[in-house]
């Protein structure tokens, strides 16, 4: 059996859903293939404000607002007795001032149901096993849950398959990540000791060691996501027998700030272990296709950039696909890959400088510099394409240089007191 569509999207996560929603607004016929069955648990439960722009433009914001997810007005970073809080309403430049903390099972299902409501043909439990291109047209072979196969002819293909990385595997365009190998383990916990007020709902990142940190993401349903992130070798050493539950519990015991709240509480599900999660590709597009979201790059969860890059790329890809379907010339290199890499490179710098400790020097330096903090806050909010912000424009040097200056002043102060 062979079917036909204008655009075929692989993956119904945030990237695929935003792309599908926008395409349906333009009356483009869309089929969305999803290998799994929603709801399903995935990482990426902390959003950043830039994503709200994408949900609004794709006509998805109203569906999400109705779910009453936990609002996220900022983020807190903890290092021993030092605390740094970023408030998204106090950032450089224009942009959204809040976002959400979400159980992805509920969040992704809401998006998926919304695109069906908008007329997208969403098919669960269907796996792409082959793709062939003839010019810009593609023929995709799909395997159903019962083992049967069929084909879809599409005028354009968007790979939003996330960790499935369908086209990177089939077209052999995977590439090593720029980042050192890190791993994560997480689960949800019934937060029965949750404090009242803002303390109970505050998203926090507790630094255990310079390269090791615990995330705490409270949800509006009374559950909280708790996860540990660090170099793969460090995470492996948290358990003697590759037991993710034991490793996570040992990590929680290392957190002076959170051990009383979460220590020894049962898990809602067996902790999920993500090993060496960072990924990249040699190119983000080709004749008749484009890669979006985690199919292209996945950096690191420390600044919650994953969903933002997914929705940014999904929306951008959908807009350019509409132009191409309308017969307009599209420069995918400049308008898509170069554009996305601009933002990815900024966040990559921030991730790298987090793990060197340089960014942590800026976060916890006292007294705070409000101007510096506002500019960093804009980056953490996802506005990494605003080159009026020097912490975007000069990202490859400004953090390192400022951290070096702070360390020099500390050394001078220390020597003068001896």
Image: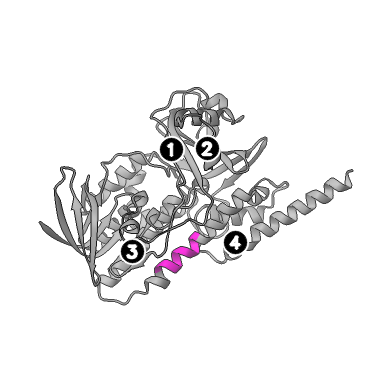
Closest to the observer, 86 or 148: 148
Of marks 3 and 2, the one in the foreground: 2
The N terminus, quarter of image: bottom left
- Prevalent SS, magenta region: helix
Kindly identify which residue carries mark 2.
Answer: 235
Disc 4 is placed on an element classified as helix
Name the residue: 59% across, 54% down: 376
Q: Position of residue 213 (x, y in %)?
A: 56, 39
Residue 360 x, y percent position in the rendering? 64, 47
Where does residue 170 sit, x and y in percent of width and height?
Answer: 30, 58
Give the numbered dot on residue 273: 1
Q: Position of residue 75 (x, y in %)?
A: 54, 43
Q: Which residue is pictured at 46% across the width and 37% down the height?
A: 185
Compare marks 4 and 1 and give the one earlier in the sequence.
1
Mark 3 or mark 4: which comes first in sequence? 3
Q: CA distance from mark 3 to mark 2?
A: 34 Å
Q: Confirm or deny contact between disc 2 and disc 1 (CB under 8 A).
A: yes
Q: Secondary structure at mark 3?
A: strand
Label 3 or label 4, whichever lies nearer to me, is 3
Q: Which mark is residue 290?
A: 3
Camera sees residue 223: no
Magenta stretch: give its range: 336-344
Whether the magenta-drawn stretch holds residue 51 is answered as no
Q: Residues within 10 Å of mark 4 (few under 14, many from 20)?
A: many
Residue at mark 4: 395
**Residue shown at the point (59%, 42%) measured from the top left:** 77
């Amino acid at each position: 059996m062979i079917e036909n569509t204008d655009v075929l999207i692989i993956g119904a996560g945030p990237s695929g859903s935003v792309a599908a929603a926008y395409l349906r607004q333009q009356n483009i016929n869309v089929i969305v293939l999803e290998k799994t069955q929603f709801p399903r648990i995935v990482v990426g439960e902390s959003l950043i404000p830039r994503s709200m722009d994408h949900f609004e433009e794709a006509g998805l914001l109203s569906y999400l607002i109705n779910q009453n997810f936990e609002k996220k007005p900022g983020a807190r970073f903890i290092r021993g007795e030092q605390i740094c809080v970023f408030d998204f309403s106090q950032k450089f430049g224009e942009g959204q001032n809040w976002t959400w903390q979400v159980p992805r099972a509920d969040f992704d299902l809401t998006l998926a149901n919304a695109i069906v409501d908008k007329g997208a043909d969403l098919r669960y439990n269907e796996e792409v096993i082959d793709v062939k291109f003839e010019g810009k047209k593609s023929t995709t072979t799909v395997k159903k849950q019962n083992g049967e196969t069929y084909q879809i002819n599409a005028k354009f293909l968007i790979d939003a398959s996330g960790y499935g990385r369908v086209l990177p595997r089939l077209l052999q365009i995977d590439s090593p990540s720029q980042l050192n190998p890190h791993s994560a383990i997480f689960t949800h916990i019934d937060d029965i000791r949750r404090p009242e007020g803002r303390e109970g709902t505050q998203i926090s990142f507790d630094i255990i060691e310079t390269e090791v940190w615990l995330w705490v993401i409270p949800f509006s349903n009374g559950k909280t996501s708790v996860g540990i992130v660090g170099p793969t070798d460090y995470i492996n050493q948290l358990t003697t027998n590759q037991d993710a539950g034991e490793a996570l519990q040992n990590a929680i015991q290392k957190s002076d700030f959170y051990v009383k709240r979460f220590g020894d509480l049962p898990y809602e599900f067996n902790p999920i272990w993500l090993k060496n999660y960072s990924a990249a590709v040699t190119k983000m597009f080709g004749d008749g296709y484009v890669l979006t979201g985690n199919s292209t790059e996945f950096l690191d969860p420390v600044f919650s950039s994953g969903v933002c890059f997914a929705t940014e790329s999904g929306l951008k890809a959908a807009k350019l696909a509409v132009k191409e379907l309308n017969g307009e010339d599209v420069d995918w290199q400049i308008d898509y890959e170069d554009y996305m890499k601009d933002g990815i490179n900024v966040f990559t710098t921030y991730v790298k400088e987090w793990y060197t400790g340089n960014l942590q020097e800026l976060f916890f330096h006292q007294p705070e510099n409000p101007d510096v903090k506002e500019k960093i806050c804009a980056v953490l909010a996802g506005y990494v394409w605003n080159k009026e912000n020097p912490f975007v424009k000069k990202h490859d040097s400004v953090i390192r240089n400022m951290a070096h200056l702070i360390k020099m002043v500390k050394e001078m102060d220390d020597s003068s007191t001896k």
